[in-house]
Amino acid sequence: MLIAEAIGDLARLLERAEALQPTMLESRQALVNAHAQLADQLTTFETHVAALTEKAKVQAVKHILARTEEAARQSVQVQTRALTEAAQAIFMEEIRKELQRDSVPHQTQQRWGRLLGHAVTAALASLLTWVLAAYLGAR
């Protein structure tokens, strides 16, 4: 009788194992489908990340370019002012020396010195503005 019970238990166990087979196949297929969906989602995600990365690169380059251009503009302005002031000072010194050598009365010397200083400043400012415009226009 013990053998008969063991054979009966084995038969029930085999029936239960056979009943589990379709459920296991469904679970396997669900896992395969989930894997395929995740692979598709990963590809889409990677595409979005790559697009965002490229956009960030472009924005960073634009920002760097804008800051570089602004720094260059400021540098040109500072250099232009410094050159104008230096040229004006040199020219005024030369004019002063020349006027002191001449025998023209002091008041006339001062008036001509001021007029020449203004004329030179205007001429140098015009020249440097033209050079700056030509430089920025060539870029």
Image (cartoon, rainbow, N blue to C red):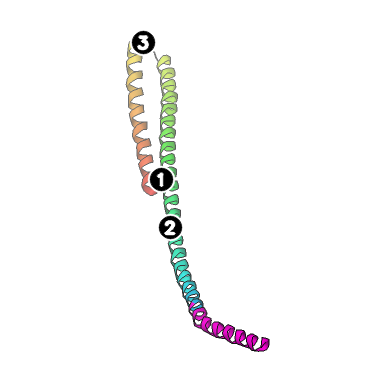
Q: Mark 3: which secondary structure?
A: helix
Q: Amino acid at mark 2?
A: Leu
Q: Which mark is residue 41?
A: none
- In the image, 115 versus 23, the foreground residue is 23
First reached walking from the N terminus: tag 2 or tag 3: 2
Say above or below: 60 vs 119: below
Q: Which residue is mark 2?
A: 52
Q: CA distance from mark 1 to mark 3?
A: 53 Å
Give coordinates of residue 62: x percent, y percent: 41, 50
Which numbered disc, 1 or 2, marks the residue closer to the eye?
2
Give residue 122's quadrant in the image.
top left
Residue 4 located within the stretch drawn in magenta = yes
Give coordinates of residue 110: x percent, y percent: 35, 14
Give coordinates of residue 106: x percent, y percent: 36, 10
Q: Amino acid at mark 3?
A: His
Q: CA distance from mark 2 to mark 3?
A: 74 Å
Q: Which residue is mark 1?
A: 66
Report whether residue 115 is seen. Answer: yes
Q: Residue at x 45, y 54 (%)?
A: 57
Q: Residue at x 37, y 32 (%)?
A: 124
First reached walking from the N terminus: tag 1 or tag 2: 2
Give coordinates of residue 136: x percent, y percent: 38, 44
Residue 66 located within the stretch drawn in magenta = no
Q: Which residues are magenta?
A: 1-26
What predominant SS class does the magenta segment belong to? Answer: helix
Report whether residue 105 is seen. Answer: no
Q: Which mark is residue 106?
A: 3
First reached walking from the N terminus: tag 1 or tag 3: 1
Which numbered disc, 2 or 3, marks the residue closer to the eye?
2
**Which quarter shows the N terminus?**
bottom right
Q: CA distance from mark 1 to mark 2?
A: 21 Å
Say above or below: 85 vs 103: below
